[in-house]
Amino acid sequence: MTVRIQAVDVQDVRFPTSQGLHGSDAMNPDPDYSAAYVTLQTNSDVQGNGIAFTLGRGTDLCVAAAQRLAAPLIGKSLDELTANMAQFWRMMTGDSQYRWLGPEKGVIHLATAAIVNAVWDLWAKVEGKPLWKLLVDLSPEQIVSCIDFRYLTDVLTPEAALELLQAKAATKAERESLALQNGMPAYTTSAGWLGYTDDYIRDRCVEGMEAGWQHFKIKVGANLQQDLHRLDLVRSQIGDDRHLMIDANQVWDVPQAISWMKEFAPFRPLWIEEPTSPDDVLGHRRIAEAIAPIGVASGEMCQNRIMFKQFLQAGAIQFCQIDSCRLGGVNEVLAVLLLAQKFDVPVCPHGGGVGLCEHIQHLSLFDYIAVSGI
Amino acid sequence: MTVRIQAVDVQDVRFPTSQGLHGSDAMNPDPDYSAAYVTLQTNSDVQGNGIAFTLGRGTDLCVAAAQRLAAPLIGKSLDELTANMAQFWRMMTGDSQYRWLGPEKGVIHLATAAIVNAVWDLWAKVEGKPLWKLLVDLSPEQIVSCIDFRYLTDVLTPEAALELLQAKAATKAERESLALQNGMPAYTTSAGWLGYTDDYIRDRCVEGMEAGWQHFKIKVGANLQQDLHRLDLVRSQIGDDRHLMIDANQVWDVPQAISWMKEFAPFRPLWIEEPTSPDDVLGHRRIAEAIAPIGVASGEMCQNRIMFKQFLQAGAIQFCQIDSCRLGGVNEVLAVLLLAQKFDVPVCPHGGGVGLCEHIQHLSLFDYIAVSGI
């Protein structure tokens, strides 16, 4: 049977996470983890789902944008879309009147992500595979055909992308069985949100170590003395051999980032995440140069592949944190995974509530098996 | 009487400009010039107006965003807002739940511009001055106090901004009378939109020269042979002494921009505008290096001061084209005018329909009188 999209539902889903300070950081004191939740209804019993991840207010703007942008999909068959995924993605981002409102950034791009990911979800369900497996089973040529290379060809051409993927093709099966056996590395922020008491932080560290975590991340940037206290607390709890990462959520200017990081250096963080504006490629580069060997991580609010291209070109980030619901869905994620591979920068995707972490698992598995794994 | 904001009206205003191909270019084949039109109603007979300039579809998203973002202004007095304009701007851009949808880009930033400019409009009307005169009459200290320097201080501190303005303060009056006498230089695109016949183009050139225009801009990027034909036509009409500028509206990748520009170089364009993605600082730099002495112009879709900072830092643009309705209104425009002055890059603002050109006149006059004029 030809699966055909018959209707698009978009729900405004909000969770009152701010009541427990979960998700709180120096820039976002009271987020209510929320989503514009897209459901593609079809002529079969299979649906496609995708989200725009939001923090509460404004979710309705993403809902309205997703309703409008998804309208052209109604009546289309899944086959039409998957037959040329790059063309599908260009169609989603190429309506010139909507494009003016970005381009490829902000509300319309968040909505694009929700719709694009819903189409991928539908495809995977129709194929009877989890998304990661659908992706892993695509040939290098098929993967390349999913990517819109517009604005990338000065750094990555389709031919070069194909070569990167072909170089990994022969050993995919081996990595697939390894990954299924061992899982993928990850970190926890359970001890790290702002506003927690010392006892609560200590308990979360102990709990985390007992559960086997080797990487702990904490939020910084609101208060220097409190940050030093919390860094000391967490480092003393987790010991010297586990990794500690810190995250400033964009609160610093470039000179301030460099000066606070001098204070934090004795606690040997693996990375500082989002030290300044997510738009500031040259600023991140200056920070990275000043604080090496501590790495700079960024990407959860990096708007599109063009910005990632520059962050990677400039050596401005040492850890690439894609967000699969801020980038324009799986197609654009594929482009950034390949860019990161070209520059040999590890990808550590941005997770979070409301389903973001599920996206991560699929895309990290694919990245390890088909793109970046050794 | 204390002027107080009592209500916010936002209208969805659309003009069917696509019917005559007016405004058409290689990226935007059928724009319908439109606006989310903000009116701040007060307890007096004075209103404040501002717009988000749009191309048709999606105007409703900007309307909804402006309604939500402006809600906190209801009940506030104009004095409260103008007493600390930087704080007002931070309030407009700092709601962390809405900020997540940008930050400072896309739909929410377009809506911010409309609201911020409406407050400036209200202020000017209450003072009984046109906006440019309100701005010109502010002291250097007052201008600096209107700017949110977040993410700029690695390149421009408040102290350095003050020095730039103070250096021009003594000669402001002289430039004001000169400008009122002579007006400001400008260019025309009347002959330049795509889809016009040769005869129509020729007529517009003749008409433009008769009206005294010295600078003519045409759109390129859709078809190389047609572009060469139109460049030849316009250059032969306007002669060697008038200036010809070209505008690709982001259709090229970096290598393609460089190769097309080699073809266009014999027609001696003053600048190529928007040769590639408005997000690509490093790409613009590479193009600028390859095509010098032809300049690169960009900015009409440059999302915020942080991107302009980098375009200027990197030497990626030789002409800075702010758009006062894409940047977050007058406050952010002031920041970019000062950044451009620091890097000695001329500002040639982006105009257009639905009121954009009126903004330009005010801000160009201010720029010439208080910031960049000799």
Image (tube, coloured by chain):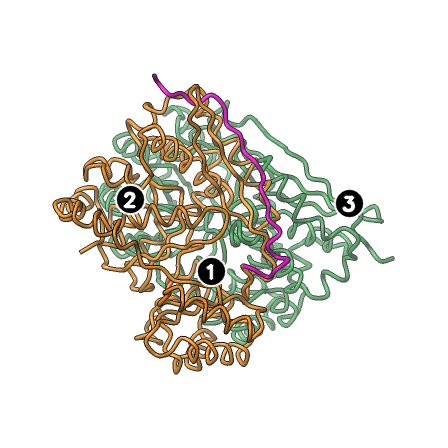
Chain colours: A green, B orange
Q: Amino acid at mark 2?
A: Asp
Q: Is residue B250 above or below residue B361?
A: below
- What span is in magenta? B1-22
User: N-terminal of the two: label 3 or label 2?
Assistant: 3
Q: Amino acid at mark 1?
A: Ile
Q: Residue A350 magenta-drawn?
A: no
Residue under the point 57% across and 73% down: A162
Position of the C terminus of chain B, as image quadrant, is: bottom left
Instruction: Using the image, tell me which numbered label, if any, was put on residue A306.
Output: 1
- List x then y, in percent, for residue B139: 19, 37
Residue under the point 52% across and 75% down: A160
- List x then y, in percent, for residue B218: 46, 69
Chain under disc 1 = A
Q: Which residue is mark 2?
A: A253
Same chain for the residues under marks 2 and 1 in the image: yes
Position of the N terminus of chain B, as image quadrant, is: top left
Towards the viewer: A269 or A241: A269
Q: Secondary structure at mark 1?
A: helix
User: N-terminal of the two: label 3 or label 1?
Assistant: 3
- Residue A204, picture quadrant: top left
Task: Find the distance from the CA under tag 3 to the CA under tag 1.
Answer: 32 Å
Q: Amino acid at mark 3?
A: Ala
Task: Kindly report which numbered mark, 3 or 2, lies closer to the viewer in this rendering.
Answer: 3
Disc 1 crowd, CA 10 A, few/some/many (<14, 14-19, 20+): many
